[in-house]
Amino acid sequence: IYTSELFTRGAPEQRRDIHVGIDLGGPVGAPVTLPCAGVVAFQGYNAAAGDYGHCVVTRHTLQNQTLYMLFGHLDRDSIRHATDVELPAGYVIGRLGDRAENGGWPPHLHFQLILDIGSATGDYPGVCKRSERDRWLSICPDPRPLLGLAVA
């Protein structure tokens, strides 16, 4: 699906076409809930075509480890949270946005786990270069087990 120039520039190993999250389709306005308790670490709007649009990143402590969860392609009303306020599992963190507000994509959620957020404060890559695949997949583990989805 990464066929635009944004993702295909350069030699094959330098192309950004390795997806490090999972995309879950749904209708515009569908609620997105937290799978476990946490706090909002940061949120923002990434307006460029092919980007997240509205995005919320939460921070969680699971088994004494800090884990971040990125929720991308949300609607504008999803950017409304106080940071560092405890939110329960099942809390509606946002709703799916339409093409005009989610980077031009069909409505869906980009969900990504992140072990090391680094200095990020408003955005975080969801697609990486082929040459950096191993590094990014070690930082962003497969989210399917957390979501109860089968891993092939």
Image: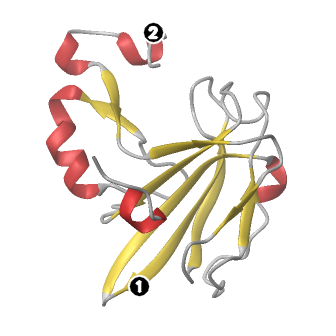
Q: Quadrant of residue 52?
A: top right
In the rendered image, residue 9, in percent from the top left (x then y), is placed at 34, 10
Q: Is residue 25 visible?
A: yes
Picture residue at 20% right of the left edge, 37% below the top: 133
Picture residue at 45% right of the left edge, 48% below the top: 124
Q: Is residue 27 left or right of residue 109?
A: right
Picture residue at 46% right of the left edge, 16% below the top: 6
Q: Is residue 119 visible?
A: no
Q: Of circles 1 and 2, which is in front?
A: 1
Q: Against 133, is 35 above or below?
A: below
In the rendered image, residue 114, in percent from the top left (x then y), is placed at 37, 61
Mark 1 crowd level (few <14, some 14–19, many ≥20, 10 Å Cα): few
User: Pointer 1: what residue?
Assistant: 61
User: Pointer 2: what residue?
Assistant: 5
Picture residue at 36% right of the left edge, 12% below the top: 8
Disc 2 secondary structure class: helix
Q: CA distance from mark 1 to mark 2?
A: 38 Å
In the rendered image, residue 128, in percent from the top left (x then y), is placed at 31, 34
How many numbered dots are placed on residues in this image?
2
Q: Is residue 151 left or right of residue 124?
A: left
